[in-house]
């Protein structure tokens, strides 16, 4: 499940984005005016934002695949006694980049071969060992599994922001991990102190 190269804290990390803007650990909320079939109505959790661009994961667009199907495809068997709700969790459509590979947002803990701690509450792992840990019963307490991720080249997201394509707000791990999928868009907007109905009305009059 390779995606990002392994992260090594002893090596130099990429520098900040040229704009000086760093939206890591933020939600990108698609404006109602966005009719794009991929990103319309989505909330994206931003994992990295630096001079190489932006990497994020859509957190509210489920696929028709569930964890048990994913485990079957990668030949992982759940340990006896693990709760069935694990296998019934839907896999998210994380974005159009590398949409044949899996990516995991999860609570930090455990050492995985290709993982990035975004905050004290959220880590991003692209190596299969995190799912092996889940199958054995030793996985993260909270997680979201996606197929694919969302990526922007340097300056691309900044341009979309300047055209009012997205709202941005500091992320809340509770929205990411605990809320039902269908409630995440509205909850993300409410983090801004905005009534989602008012936002929809303004978009309709744009």
Image (cartoon, helix red, strand yellow):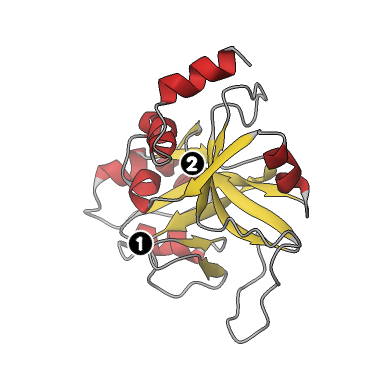
For residue 2, what is the image quadrant?
bottom right
In the foreground, 125 or 74: 125
Q: State the residue at coordinates (30%, 61%).
A: 137
Q: State the residue at coordinates (50%, 19%).
A: 200
Which part of the image, by quadrant, shows the C terminus? top right
Q: Which one is earlier in the sequence, the residue at label 1 or at label 2? A: 2
Q: State the residue at coordinates (45%, 21%).
A: 198
Vertical position of residue 98 compared to residue 42: above or below: below
Any part of residue 2 in sight: no
Left or right: where 197 falls relative to 156: left
Mark linked to residue 204 = none
Question: Spatial distance from mark 1 to mark 2, Cα to Cα?
Answer: 17 Å
Q: Residue furthest left?
A: 81
Q: Secondary structure at mark 2?
A: loop
Mark linked to residue 59 = 2
Vertical position of residue 198 compared to residue 94: above or below: above
Left or right: where 158 falls relative to 84: right
Dot in front, 1 or 2: 2
In the foreground, 160 or 70: 160
Vertical position of residue 152 compared to residue 61: above or below: below
In the foreground, 147 or 39: 39
Counting from the top left corner in percent of width and height, residue 138 is at 32, 66
Counting from the top left corner in percent of width and height, residue 201 is at 50, 15
Any part of residue 114 in sight: yes
Left or right: where 41 falls relative to 164: left
Q: How many marks?
A: 2
Quick one: label 2, few (<14), some, or many (20+) residues within 10 Å? many
Which part of the image, by quadrant, shows the N terminus? bottom right
Q: State the residue at coordinates (44%, 51%).
A: 171
- Which residue carries the number 1 mark? 140
Vertical position of residue 185 compared to residue 77: above or below: above
Q: Secondary structure at mark 1?
A: loop
């Amino acid at each position: 499940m390779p995606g990002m190269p392994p992260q090594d804290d002893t090596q130099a990390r990429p520098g900040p984005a040229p704009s000086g803007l760093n939206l890591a650990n933020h939600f990108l909320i698609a404006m109602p005016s966005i009719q794009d079939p991929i990103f319309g109505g989505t909330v994206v959790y931003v994992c990295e934002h630096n001079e190489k661009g932006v990497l994020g994961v859509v957190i509210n667009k489920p696929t028709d695949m569930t964890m048990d199907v994913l485990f079957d495809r990668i030949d992982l068997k759940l340990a006896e006694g693990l709760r069935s709700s694990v296998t019934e969790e839907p896999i998210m459509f994380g974005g159009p980049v590398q949409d044949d590979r899996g990516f995991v947002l999860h609570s930090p803990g455990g050492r995985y071969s290709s993982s990035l701690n975004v905050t004290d509450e959220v880590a991003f792992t692209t190596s299969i060992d995190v799912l092996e840990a889940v199958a054995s019963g030793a996985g993260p307490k909270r997680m979201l599994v996606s197929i694919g991720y969302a990526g922007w080249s340097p300056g691309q997201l900044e341009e979309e922001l300047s055209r009012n394509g997205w709202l941005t707000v500091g992320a809340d791990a509770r929205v990411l991990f605990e809320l039902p999928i269908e409630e995440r868009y509205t909850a993300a907007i409410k983090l801004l102190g905005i009534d989602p109905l008012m936002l929809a009305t303004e978009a309709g009059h744009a």
